[in-house]
Image (spheres, rainbow, N blue to C red):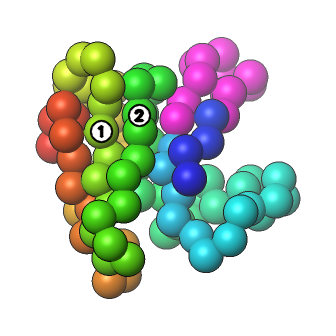
Amino acid sequence: MITERSDHEALGGLEYYVLIGNHLLTPAELRRAYYSDAVVFNASSNCLTLHWDGPYKLTIKCNGSIMDRSHINAQRQQSGNITISYENIALK
């Protein structure tokens, strides 16, 4: 799932997270997930879309432009048995 989170304390603006879970997360679960291994990608750009290529391959794509490293806060290539690939997103 893609989630949007604002950082009101630091006035850092919006951040976008890609989280992997086995169900739709509640608000309380989301707050915990932001600091867990569930986060596979985090960036300050809202161009993200997800595409599952079967049960074990997730593609994260930036639509309309190319996201450079300066916008990426966290990026993983693997989460458990799920391989994560990227389109139009620089590798950190």
C-alpha distance separating marks 2 and 1: 6 Å
**Where residue 16 sits: x, y (%)?**
52, 35
Identify the element where label 2 is drawn.
strand
Identify the residue at image location x=56%, y=53%: 1
Residue shown at 41%/39% (left/top)? 49
Q: In the shown orientation, is residue 69 left or right of residue 4?
A: left
The reply to whether the C-beta atoms of the residues labelled 2 and 1 are less than 8 Å apart is yes
- Name the mark on residue 61: 1
Residue 11 within the magenta-colored segment of the rendering: yes
Structural crowding at the residue carrying mark 2, measured as other residues with C-alpha within 10 Å and reported as few (<14), some (14–19) or many (≥20): some
Q: Give the magenta range.
A: 5-16
Q: Nearer the viewer, residue 48 or 74?
A: 48
| Residue holding disc 2 | 48
Q: Sequence order check: which comes first, mark 2 or mark 1?
A: 2
Amino acid tagged 2? Leu
| Nearer to the camera, 76 or 56 | 56
> Residue at 72% across / 56% down in the picture?
30
> Tag 1: residue type?
Lys
Q: Quadrant of the C terminus?
A: top left
Task: Name the residue rendered at 24%, 17% in the picture.
Answer: 65
Residue 7 included in the magenta stretch of the image: yes
Q: Is residue 26 left or right of residue 10?
A: right
Mark 1 Cα-neighbour bin, 10 Å: few <14, some 14–19, many ≥20: some
